[in-house]
Structure formats: C-alpha cells, structure tokens
Image (tube, rainbow, N blue to C red):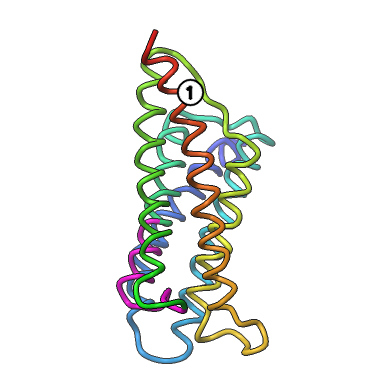
Amino acid sequence: MSWRKNLPNYLTYLRIAVIPALILVFFLKGEWSYDLSAGLFLLAGVTDWLDGYAARAFQAHSNIGRFLDPIADKLLVATALMLLVGDGRADYADGHAMMIPAIAIVCREILVSGLREFLAEIRVGVPVSRLAKWKTGVQMTAIFLLLWAHGGPDWLHAGILGNVLLWLAAILTLVTGYAYLKTGLKHMAQ
C-alpha cells in the first residue's frame, strides 16, 4: 500500500532524472539521438500526467510532491527549450525567431512561480485553468516534435509543426500569464 502513496513522488523523481539524460543524449551524434531525446522527453511528459493521476486516484498528495512537481515541469521545459534554441534545432523559421516564444515561455514560468509563492503566503490559492492545461499540452507537443524533427518521418514535417505549436504555446503562455498576473495584482493592491 505504501508504494501507492509514494508513486506520484517516484514519478516526479524520474522526471527530474530524465533531465541530465536528455542533455547527454541531445548532444550525441547519430540519427538515433533525435529519436532517443524525443523519447526521453515523451517519457517525462507521460510521468507528469501519471503523477497527477496517481495522486488523485490513490489520494497520495504530499508536501514534497506539491513542491517538486511544478519545479520538475519547469526544469524539464526550460532545459529542452534552451537545448533546442542553443543548438539551432528550433530555427525552422528565420534565424533566431524561435528564441522569442522560448523566452516568453520561460519568463511566464518564472512569473507564475513568483506569483504562486506570493499568493500562497497570503493564503490565496490559484487553481490551474483549463486554458493553462491546454497551454501545457501544446507546449509539450511542440517541444517533443522539435526534438524529434530530424529523426521523425518526413511526411510529418515535425520541425515545422513543432514551430507552429511553439508559437501557439507562447501565445497561450502570454494569455494565461496575464490572467495569473491580474489575480496577483488584485491581491497585492489590497
């Protein structure tokens, strides 16, 4: 029975452990490195969904989970975006255009983390909106496709699709970030 209570945390630890493996595989030479880096990112994304599902199903919420889960997500996304932009794999548009949505996404994550911390101190909870969940799904899909772009099937046009989805994720990031900011400012003014 105790493994059920700890399963969400184990999945979060696994997601964090994937990050150094993703970095290592990303820089290896060979066509298989694209497949493996995309596969590692997909594994991490699945553990993100699974740990939330397991926490609800087994009523296995914990303080360490509440603390580490959002950090693991942000570390994974920020690392993958830095790898893609730094290596030029996200540049299917013109030059460094993909740096713009990557910066928007990372800055929003920092802003929301700070706002959540402030609001938690004054005992105000901010539930994750449906739009924020869509943003996460689009963002994770975009990053997966960009990691897989050179290894995936040609008919998929994973790089182009990944770039389009990354821009969409950036737009959703700004919209949801504004909603969080508006809530935070309302409580700061009181």
Relative side of 1 to 105, left or right = right
Comparing 45 with 121, the one in front is 121
- Percent x, y for residue 120? 41, 20
Taking the magenta stretch, the answer to whether it contains residue 85 is yes
Q: Position of residue 128 (x, y in %)?
A: 57, 34
Residue at mark 1? 183
- Which residue lies at the image location 53% right of the left edge and 68% below the top edge? 144
Q: Farthest residue toward the front?
A: 94
Choose top left, top right, bottom left or bottom right for residue 116: top left
Q: Quadrant of the N terminus?
A: top right
Relative to the observer, which residue lies in front, 105 or 116?
Answer: 105
Q: Is residue 74 above or below residue 63?
A: below
Q: Position of residue 141 (x, y in %)?
A: 58, 63
Q: Quadrant of the C terminus?
A: top left
Left or right: residue 101 compared with residue 139 = left
Q: Residue at x 53, y 57 (%)?
A: 139
Looking at the rendered structure, the secondary structure element under dot 1 is helix
Q: Residues within 10 Å of mark 1 (few under 14, many from 20)?
A: some
Relative to 96, residue 17 above or below: above
Residue 12: x and y in percent read: 47, 48
Q: Label 1 is placed on what type of residue? A: Thr
Residue located at (48% from left, 31% from top):
180
The span picked out in magenta is 78-92
Quadrant housing residue 19: bottom left
